[in-house]
Amino acid sequence: MSASNKEIVRRFLEQSLQEKRTIEEVCASGFTAHIGAMPAMNLEAFKEYQNNYYRSFAENSIKIEEIIQEGSIVAFRGTVHSVHAAEFMGLPASGREIAVPVVGMARLKEGKVYEWWNSPDRLSWMQQLGFALRQV
């Protein structure tokens, strides 16, 4: 029996964080990622985006609070847990443990992730790292 779309998305989320790599074997040909307001990324650009994150953060995991499926679309809500272990956006490693809420969706095609949307709570993330907010 083949894996359900929800199982594939769960694997993509959890295994990517555990192994600190993009799980390419569950990505369809023509994969596209949409992360927040950033321009759409193909698989190679998405791998580089993730590698930049993995260079700066350790002990990565996700607690998936909800995951639902409607046809070929899977939506999820969870919290990513990490430790700021190396320089990130000019901020030296702090050793801080962070917990960043995230919501996202995936469109699957023939049992693989074809399109990926992920929206981490960037304000919470930056505040936990110690970036100061200033009024403009």
Image (cartoon, rainbow, N blue to C red):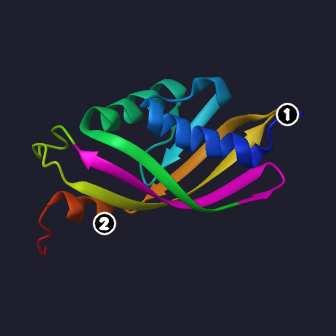
- The residue segment tinted magenta is 68-84
Residue 37 x %, y %: 43, 54
Q: Is residue 116 left or right of residue 19?
A: right
Within the image, what quadrant is residue 12 found in? top right
Element type at mark 1: loop
Q: Residue at x 66, y 29 (%)?
A: 26
Q: Residue at x 51, y 57 (%)?
A: 63
Helix, strand or loop for the magenta stretch, by majority? strand
Res 33 seen here: no
How many callouts does the rendering have? 2
- Cα distance between the residues tagged 2 and 1: 37 Å
Residue 11 x %, y %: 62, 39
Q: Decide whether residue 30 is among the magenta residues.
A: no
Within the image, what quadrant is residue 86 found in? top left
Q: Quadrant of the N terminus?
A: top right
Name which residue type carries label 2. Answer: Ser
Q: Residue at x 33, y 38 (%)?
A: 53
Element type at mark 2: helix
Q: Quadrant of the C terminus?
A: bottom left
Q: Decide whether residue 70 is among the magenta residues.
A: yes
Residue 9 x %, y %: 66, 44
For discs 2 and 1, the disc positioned in front in the rendered view: 1
Circle 1 residue: 2
Q: Residue at x 46, y 30 (%)?
A: 19
Q: Is residue 86 left or right of residue 43?
A: left
